[in-house]
Amino acid sequence: MARKDSVLLFIPALIGGIIVVSIFLLDLQLADFQEAYFREVIDETRRNNFFLIRFCKEQLEANDPEKIRRLLRTSGPNPVVAKIIARSRGVVAETENAPDYLAEHIRSPRIRGLFKKNDQEDVLVKYDETLNSFMVYHSAHFNAGGQDYILVMAAKCNSMTMLMRQTRDGMIILTILGILSTIVLIVYFCSIIRSPLNRLFASMSKIAAGELEYPVYVPRYGLVREIAICLQSLTEQLKKQIVSLRDDANEREAILDALTEAILLVNASGRVERWNRTACGLFPGLEPAAKLPECPAELREYIEKVGETGVYSEELSVKRGEKERQLLANAVSFTRDGGKYVLVSITDLSDIRKLEAYRTEFIAAISHEMKTPLTGIVGAVDAINNGALDNEEYKSRCIQTLTRQSERLHTLLQSFLTLSSLETMRKGTENDFLPVLPAAVIRGAAEECRSMAEAAEIDLVVGECSSIEFPGDFLLLQQALNSLITNAVLHSGTKRIEVSAVAAEGKQIDFLVRDYGCGIAPEHRERIFKRFYRIPGSRNGPGNGIGLAIVKHIALYHGGNVSVVSEPDAGAEFHLRIPY
């Protein structure tokens, strides 16, 4: 600002310079005026003296010098002294009672030396320092009656002297006033304008650099104060606008990050300028702190197709490790600031495809599970319609079939409803539970399953039971153990089942169901807890593939988990861990 505001000092300096130059030009004009004035005085003096010399000639030729003396005694507005000298007789006539300073001037050798040229007539104007005035001197040679005479005159120019003196005094005063005005203007500009402007500029520079909380300098008075107040108001509005824009930008970022679709903004050079958090998960090269990363390789060919049509949609297959993801990409191109951009929205269809597969599998499984009891029921109904009621043996067999298949269908529907209910239930809280003893849960489950185990000639043993009381749902936990024991009875081929509950690490109660049967192959261990999944080879046996899925959701409802440890032909251990 110090260099830029030098113009503020240049303005008063220029004004002062103009005043000084004007006075100098006025002085030159005054000198020209003085020269012209004295030129006219000289000419006028010569014209007047022409008549005076002619008058003097006439009187001298008439031998009447008295009239000349009377004429020389007449004084005009300016003091004049004159003398007529004959070469042989001396002074013929001269001004009487003339001021001593004029008489002295006419007798002065210096004045007499003014007319050394011996011209016929000469007029001079000189400034006399003694009198501090301009003097007009006239010398003329003439002849009268055969005698040579010399007319010598000296006159004081009071009016011109006074005019020049007053004019020059005025010019000096004007010069002093001009210099003082320039100094005052410079001081005013420095103290009232330049210094406040510099401080205001410094504060605005801080704000422009991003320090929005830096205060705007406002002087106490002067024109700059009004400017500073306006700038302060504009700064406050700017702060509000910036905060609003920042909030809007944060809101847009939050919205983008909350979207389940991946959003990418690709410029004409193939660089990604904006992307959201979902895009980081789909494309590892898009890190949050990266600066304009390159467009992912899987999308480059797709981006080129968008450039050709402006709008494009296509399904893409992207391989991530051993998994292949199905993506639906929708893109549109637009122009901004003269550059071409492509906005890409990518939806991950992998979960949707998986859900569709689950839905298809579920429909197939439920259809298969319901097909067997419904077939039995339909067959029994057909037999009854064909006269089976007339035969007691057929009648009894049809009733048993209807009863058995109806119970099987009821059990299937009840299990399905229980699983659906558990899948929609959130994790329980302490307010949802009551104190439960592990021993009570195990005894209840063992007593309910003992008859089934004895019928299959399986020894059901209740082992160690912890005495730690924990919050839980007694009936759901007992149902989970029933499912684990029933699953071991029906599918393990074991002769012994052990059930226990011990305190495990992490403040957990570990309900253990151990069998010594055929075991479970590794490829089936994670999948057996999915609904309707049954190990190949066991599909013709009893069960509907829902029991272990129910156990899993009961564990999740209690904030715990279920797992299996097994090897083929070495039995299996099912662990239901519930925190306390």
Image (cartoon, rainbow, N blue to C red):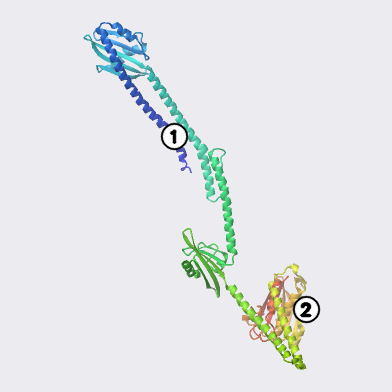
Query: Residue under circle 2?
Result: 444
Q: x and y percent of residue 419 in the render?
A: 69, 76
Q: Amino acid at mark 2?
A: Gly
Q: Residue at 29% across / 15% down in the picture? A: 49
Q: x and y percent of residue 142 in the render?
A: 24, 13
Dots 1 and 2: beta carbons under 8 Å? no
Task: From the viewer's perspective, tell me whether residue 121 is left or right of residue 179.
Answer: left
- What SS does tag 2 mark? helix
The correct choice, above or below, for 115 with respect to 8 in the image is above
Instruction: Report the front residue among 521 and 197.
Output: 197
Q: Amino acid at mark 1?
A: Ile
Task: From the viewer's perspective, tell me whether residue 425 is left or right of residue 317.
Answer: right
The correct choice, above or below, for 224 with respect to 265 in the image is above
The residue lying furthest to the left in this view is 146
Q: x and y percent of residue 405 in the render?
A: 72, 85
Q: Residues within 10 Å of mark 1 (few under 14, many from 20)?
A: some
Q: Quadrant of the C terminus?
A: bottom right
The correct choice, above or below, for 397 with respect to 9 in the image is below
Q: x and y percent of residue 493 in the render?
A: 69, 86
Disc assigned to residue 241: none
Query: Residue under circle 1?
Result: 15
Q: Residues within 10 Å of mark 2 (few under 14, many from 20)?
A: some
Q: Residue at 45% across / 40% down in the picture? A: 7
**CA distance for labels 1 and 2:** 112 Å
Nearer to us of marks 1 and 2 is 1
Residue 140, can we see it?
Answer: yes
